[in-house]
Image (cartoon, rainbow, N blue to C red):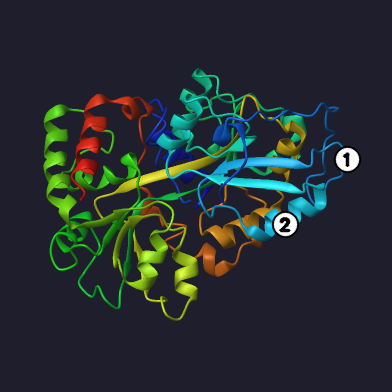
């Protein structure tokens, strides 16, 4: 996609202010068990160390002051394990802890509850203003992140962080429909067709990610409304659709929905493209397909942020720079199946992946995406609707 096209989409998305749960939407382009204060109530003491030096933009960096521990709070299966091992070896990080959350609301709830001890987290972009307001994250020293220079400028200076002080784009994608095509042979190009099949022939073989902002996209777009809708009457229409759907849902699952698709326990999924590459690479699940629904959907951007009380700041800066080395970032894209914001990494990504419309949707699909207004994330009507839906799930 040409830069001017990407910029146009982002400007369209940024026309609304952006905060906690439901992001922008607009252009082409997932551990456990840390013994942290967040989980055990114990204290984690941050070592005292000298400021880090700038690292080269490509290749391993030398940072002898980097702490031997690093605690990441992230979506599940959202970093290439080989890159983690490379980072540990290059920087002498012997204790790399990867804890996971299922959705942005869980991340915020944990931090609001007083969780501490994490270094870096990965919220979706519209949550950044709220995290800044609550004092959860700190400003970044860009002089310690030379590879920040590789980020597509069209993704920067947006309303969630207009001065680019608090975040680094991680990757981006869409919310859509995954399905096992050898089982689901009916036409499946829209939210309406997904809904009809979910409440009919494939009842109880449907899984959806456990995320308010993503799930609400379906009924609102089916009804022809914005995914940011807060009008009570329109939300009541969406509520009726979701309440009718609830008995037919196998599970809400943001972490292991690919397993349910793999075993055919589920054959329909409202989710993300992350598991798609692995499923298609397996001969037993190579029939898995992904659809961006014709009514339109959400485009999201996930980000790296440093927690305000990060106990290992030098390891954190080392990670933030390392993960955007073009060679490392290309491996991330190949592993995660999400589009990279790193312009120097794209030439290192396989042409097959760059040409995949599920990962990099064409312009006509992109023009039908919508951004999310951060103000709706705390809307009482939407939160009540979500609570009612979840309570109706068996």
Q: Which residue is mark 2?
A: 85
Q: Is residue 229 above or below residue 224?
A: above
Write down the quadrant of residue 15 in the picture.
top left
Q: Is residue 293 visible?
A: no
Q: Secondary structure at mark 1?
A: loop
Coordinates of residue 351 in the picture (x, y in percent): 57, 67
Question: Residue at 31% across / 48% down in the picture?
Answer: 297
Write down the quadrant of residue 39 in the picture.
top right
Coordinates of residue 34 in the picture (x, y in percent): 61, 43
Residue 325: assigned label: none
Q: Secondary structure at mark 2?
A: helix
Of residues 354 and 86, the one nearer the viewer is 86
Left or right: 211 in relation to 241: right
Of residues 384 and 184, the one nearer the viewer is 384
Question: Residue at 54% across / 58% down in the picture?
Answer: 336
Left or right: 375 in relation to 247: right
Crowding around mark 1 (Cα neighbors within 10 Å: few <14, some 14 to 19, many 20+) is few
Q: Is residue 180 visible?
A: yes
Of residues 162 and 282, the one nearer the viewer is 282
What is the C-alpha distance between the residues marked 2 and 1? 18 Å
Coordinates of residue 385 in the picture (x, y in percent): 21, 35
Left or right: 239 in relation to 345: left
Q: Is residue 375 above or below residue 325?
A: above
Q: If you read the primary sequence from the N terminus, does the residue marked by circle 2 or circle 1 appear first? A: 1
> Hey, which residue is sitting farthest bottom in the picture?
283
Q: Which residue is mark 1?
A: 64
Question: Residue at 44% across / 65% down in the picture?
Answer: 276
Coordinates of residue 119 in the picture (x, y in percent): 65, 34
Question: Residue at 28% across / 49% down in the picture?
Answer: 296
């Amino acid at each position: 996609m040409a830069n001017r096209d990407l910029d146009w989409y982002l400007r369209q998305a940024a026309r609304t202010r952006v905060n906690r749960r439901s992001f922008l939407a607009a252009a082409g382009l997932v551990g456990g068990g840390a013994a942290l204060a967040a989980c055990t109530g114990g204290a984690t003491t941050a070592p005292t160390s000298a400021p880090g030096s700038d690292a080269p933009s490509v290749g391993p960096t030398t940072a002898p002051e980097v702490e031997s521990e690093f605690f990441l709070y992230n979506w599940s299966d959202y970093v290439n394990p080989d890159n983690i091992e490379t980072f540990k070896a290059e920087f002498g990080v012997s204790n790399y802890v990867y804890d996971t959350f299922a959705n942005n609301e869980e991340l915020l709830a944990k931090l609001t509850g007083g969780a501490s001890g994490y270094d870096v987290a990965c919220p979706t972009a519209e949550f950044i203003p709220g995290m800044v307001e609550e004092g959860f994250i700190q400003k970044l020293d860009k002089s310690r992140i030379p590879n920040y220079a590789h980020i597509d400028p069209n993704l920067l200076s947006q309303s969630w962080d207009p001065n680019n002080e608090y975040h680094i784009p991680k990757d981006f994608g869409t919310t859509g429909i995954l399905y096992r095509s050898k089982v689901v042979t009916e036409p499946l190009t829209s939210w309406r067709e997904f809904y009809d099949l979910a409440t009919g022939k494939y009842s109880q073989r449907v899984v959806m990610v456990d995320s308010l902002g993503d799930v609400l996209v379906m009924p609102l777009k089916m009804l022809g409304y914005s995914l940011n809708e807060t009008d009570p009457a329109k939300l009541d229409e969406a509520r009726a659709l979701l309440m009718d759907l609830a008995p037919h849902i196998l599970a809400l699952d943001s972490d292991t929905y690919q397993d349910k698709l793999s075993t055919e326990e589920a054959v329909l999924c409202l989710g993300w493209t992350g598991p798609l590459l692995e499923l298609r690479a397996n001969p037993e699940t190579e029939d898995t397909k992904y659809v961006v629904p014709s009514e339109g959907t959400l485009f999201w951007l996930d980000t790296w942020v440093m927690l305000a009380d990060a106990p290992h700041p030098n390891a954190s800066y080392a990670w933030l720079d390392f993960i955007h080395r073009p060679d490392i970032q290309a491996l991330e894209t190949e592993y995660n199946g999400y589009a990279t914001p790193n312009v120097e990494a794209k030439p290192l990504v396989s042409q097959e992946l760059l040409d995949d419309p599920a990962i990099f949707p064409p312009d006509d699909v992109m023009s039908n995406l919508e951004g999310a207004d951060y103000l709706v994330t705390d809307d009482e009507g939407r939160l009540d609707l979500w609570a009612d839906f979840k309570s109706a799930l068996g």
